[in-house]
Structures are given as structure tokens and as C-alpha cells.
Image (cartoon, rainbow, N blue to C red):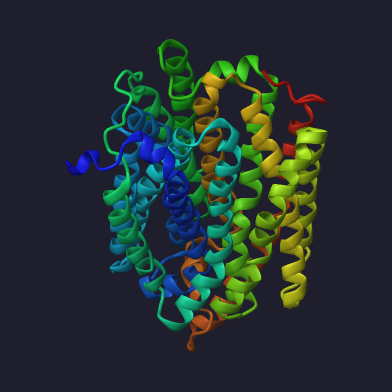
Amino acid sequence: MPLLSRITDEDAHRRRWELLALTSIGAFMGPLDGSIVSVALPVVSPDLHLSFAASMWVQAAYLLAMAVLLIPLGRLADQHGRVRFYLIGVAVFTAGSLLAALSVNGAWLILSRVIQGGGAALMVATSAAIVTAVFPPRERGRALGINVMAVYIGLSIGPPLGGILADTLGWRSIFLINLPIGLVVLVWGWMMLPRSEGAQDAPRVDFAGATLLGAFLISLLVPLTFAPEWGWAAPLTLALLALAAASLAGFVVVERRVDAPVLDLDLLVHNRLFAAANTAALLNYMALYGIGLLTAIFLEIVQDRSAALTGWLMLSQPLLMAALSPFAGHLSDRVGSRVLATGGMVTIAFGMVLLAAMSTTASVWQVAADLAVVGLGMAAFSAPNTSAIMGSVRRDQLSVASAFLGTMRTAGMALSVALLGGIAASSLGAAGGRLLFTHGHDGGAAGLAAQAVSGYAQGYRYAMITGAVLALVGAAVSLTRGAHDARS
């Protein structure tokens, strides 16, 4: 039997739980690599001579690549086969991981992270679609719930695993660990998955819209990240922000005219629940995603804790999210999403205020408790809000709704790293950004490095307060969704 027809659609349905396990690995790998890097950055940065802004881009480049490529690659997968593109995503992600492990400077590492982000975009865009295709409606919710749980497991395992690996085997091991996982998935998938599927009659990809969306995100994120070094009134900063505004305006015009827009703006205009819940999701991830990265730097640089201990402390937030999200999703079926999602955003804001109020000598228990409050808020928000979005559209719009939410989530993560990271570095300047990760060295730079550490501690507080304000704005937006979820 030819290799490409090794398994029929009937066999795929029969082996659907095995397919779920395989595709959930992709759902696990993406967030694992996003969270595993955060605790290792203070180790990576002095080795590759990264400034604080450059270290922020190690994280932001990965998210930015996902935000720009998620929907266009998902549309291409619909045309040429989701399974094939899923395996391509695993291969690209694995290759990017190898390149990252071999990095000799910051530019190499950041480019490798872009490649990883492209692979992760393919895995995220296709894994849930494959599950949906092989499970009957009566089992689909349960299967997708397991797929989403894989995301939270990746987020949970990443920080402690990254800390242990960075302390024992060196920072390159946090990327090398992806190689055996990726190779197993590729061999497993090549031997089992159907490769003949593909919707050749799918609409053409809106490349103009995707290009303008990418230009908007890039020209917005770059000045937000580097303005602390360039200056907010610097010509380059202002020019890029102007380009961002122009790209956004062009994007709206193009999306109104094309037959198959990369983002369906009509959903935002005519569906209040969809618009409010997606805007709340964007603000939610803008508020909280930077917490992991910035708090890890706070613990390792300001409090001088080990990467391993930092990883275990960072576990409290995603662990609570993973444990309580299914319960919150079930509860939202009874009381609706408005109360839970809005209350979750308020809880996130409260947790970020607690983080902002931490002293530089805060105990490990206080740090863990404050992060747990944020995790509690996220658990209350995420599943009910997602359920509301998917329940507010027609069945033939489910893939559009899922892609829209994924874009809001990923863009919010990238904006969070850029915005909150920029605020945390606001008092450092170029010299302070370079000295921040050298605080333990002897010599004349030690005093200046200590000042940089103190400046970062103050900037961290401002960043957490800013995140709390964003969460409260998100709570206000969430309230506008109406008292009940309108389901078609």
C-alpha cells in the first residue's frame, strides 16, 4: 500500500484517541517552549552578551512570528492538508530548536526563535482542526478539552524544567530537549496519519491582509520594545508608530473588500458578544503574559535566586490554571460567561497589584501566593470566555472564530512582552540594559550593575501596575457582552 494512503478516514476515526494524543503533543510543545525560556534568560543573556531589550526579543520574536503567521498558515493548511502542515510544523519547530541550541550570538538566537514561532503557528493552527475532523460531535468537546489541557501542562512544566536544565546541563539543553520529542512525533505521524485529505476548494489566502497585519504588529512591537533605549520621541520610534497606524488603516480597508478576509471584521461589528469577549481576551493576555518572564528576571536578578527555584515558584500560576479551568468551563454552562470572565479579570488585576507591592526581599511563599491569585483569575476567565466566543457564532463560522481568538491571544502575548517589558526597562537605558545581567561580577561595573538591578525592581512594579490597569479595562469590556450568552 502506498505510504501516503497508509490509513483511511475510517481508520482515522477508529484511532481517533491515538490521533488526539499525537496532536496534543504539538499543543504541548508550543507553550512549553514559550514558558521554558523565561527562567533561562538570565543565564542565556550574559553568555550571549544580550541587553535587556534584546533578551525581551528572544521571547517576543517567537510570539510575533506566531501572531503574524497563525491565520495565513491555517488557511493554507485547509487548502493543502492539515495533517501534512501539522507535520511540517513539527519539523520546522524542531529545526528551529536545533538552531537555537547552536546560537553563538543574540541575532542568531532571535532568528531561531522566529523559525520556532513559525513551526508553532502551524502546530497550533492544525492540531485542534485535526481533532475536530476525526471526533464525532458527541465526543468533540471532551477531546478538544484534553487538547487544551495539553497547553496548560506545557505552561506548567516549562518553568521548573527550564530552571533545572539551565542549572544542571546549561541553557542550550532547554532547546535540545525538543529534538527527541519532535523526531518521535514525525516518525509516529509519518507512519500513521492520513496524508490524502485537503480542501482544494478552500478560499484563497488573503495575502494582502496578512501582510498588512504583520506590518502592523511588527511596526508596533519594535518601538514598544526598544523605545526605552531609543527614546519615545526619537524619529525612528515615531516613524514606526506612524507606520503601525497606516498599516492598521490599510488592513481595515483591505479586509472590507476581499471575499475571504484573513480576519472577518463583520463579526466585530455585528456580534457584540464576540467583539467584547475577543477584546477582553486581547487585554487579558496583554496584562498577564509578561508576568512569567518579568517575574522570573525579578527572582533571579533582584532576589538572586537560582533558575531551578525560580522555575518551581513560577509553577503556581499555570498549575492553578490547569487544575481549575475545566471546573470554570463547566460552571459557565450554568451561569454564563459574563460573571466568571469579568470576575476573573478583576482577580488578575488584584494579583498583579500584589506582585507590584512585593518587596525585594519577599519570601518564596509570598511570591507563590501572589502568582496563584493571578492563576485563579486566569482559570475563571479563560474557559468561560472561550466557550462564549465559540457559542456566539454559527457552526459554519467556528473555524473563523477559533482563528480570531488565537490571533487575539498570541498578539496579546507579544504585546505584553513588548509593553510590560519596555516599562520594566524604562529606567535602565542602554547602559543599564547591558549591565543588568552582570550584577554578580567584580570590578568597577559592579556598582552600576547594582543600580541597574534597583532600577529594574522599580520598573517591574510599574509594569505590574500597568498590567493591573489593563486587566481592569478588560473587565469593563467583558461586562458589555450582556447578561446572557447568545447562542445560535
Q: Is residue 298 left or right of residue 75?
A: right
**168 with respect to 473 (left or right):** left
At horizontal 49% and vertical 35% (from top left) the residue drawn is: 132
Of residues 319 and 231, the one drawn nearer to the viewer in this rendering: 319
Q: 442 above or below 361?
A: below
On screen, residue 272 above or below 306: above
In the picture, the quarter occupied by the C terminus is top right
Q: Is residue 395 above or below residue 347?
A: above
Quadrant, the N terminus: top left
Residue nearer the viewer, 216 or 314: 314
- Residue that appears at 23% across and 38% down: 5
| Horizontal side, residue 223 vs residue 376: left or right | left
Quadrant in which residue 168 is drawn: bottom left
- Percent of width and height locating residue 120: 40, 48
How many numbered circles does the render carry? 0
Give the quadrant of residue 173: bottom left
Residue 177 in view (yes/no): yes
In this rendered view, identify the residue nearer to me: 6 or 230: 6
Q: At which x and y percent is residue 28?
A: 48, 55
Residue 378 shows in this picture: no
Please say if 456 is above or below 132. Answer: below
The residue positioned 35% from the left and 36% from the top of the image is 82
